[in-house]
Amino acid sequence: MAVKSINIYSTHTCPFCKMTKHYLDEQGLKYGEIFVDDDEAKKSEMVNLSGQMGTPVVLVEYDDGEKRQFVGYDEAKLVQLTKGEKSGEALIQEMKP
């Protein structure tokens, strides 16, 4: 399954966010960054999405429209992404505005 987009909710100082982005950079995967320490609305969006305050929150959208997310540096899930496999928990509810 092809990945349409990857977005990472992170903070400027989070070491696990840096590790996640470093891994994706090494694999040549493009991603968007959303710094929740700069934007209260984005922080609320992240909490609504993941149910917690921990970072990073990785949101993946696939070509078939399915969205999945996972929290923290999780190399096994990142490896799945590089192989084109679905990774993370299915997004049960869309983010509230």
Image: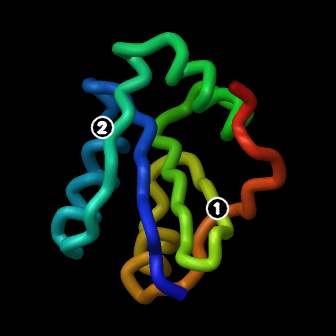
Picture mark count? 2
Viewer-proximal residue among 54 and 9: 9
Q: Amino acid at mark 1?
A: Lys
Task: Find numbered disc 1 in the image and state the secondary structure of the residue it sits on.
Answer: strand
In three-dimensional space, the C-alpha distance between marks 1 and 2, rounded to whole angstroms, equals 25 Å
**Residue reaching furthest to the right:** 92
Q: Quadrant of residue 75?
A: bottom left
- In the picture, residue 50 is in which quadrant? top right
* Residue under pointer 2: 15
Query: In this image, 2 relative to 70: left or right?
Result: left
Q: Is residue 32 above or below residue 38?
A: below
Residue at 82%, 53% in the rendered image: 92
In the rendered structure, find residue 67 and report the number of the disc placed on it. Answer: 1
Look at the numbered disc 2 and give the secondary structure of its residue.
helix
Looking at the image, residue 63 sits to the left or right of residue 21; the answer is: right
Q: What is the three-letter code of the residue carrying label 2? A: Pro
Q: Is residue 29 above or below residue 12?
A: below
Point 34% across, 42% down: residue: 17
Question: How has the structure been colored for display?
Answer: rainbow
Q: Which residue is pictured at 26% across the width and 63% down the height?
A: 30
Which dot, 1 or 2, sits closer to the camera? 1
Q: x, y (%) of residue 11?
A: 35, 27
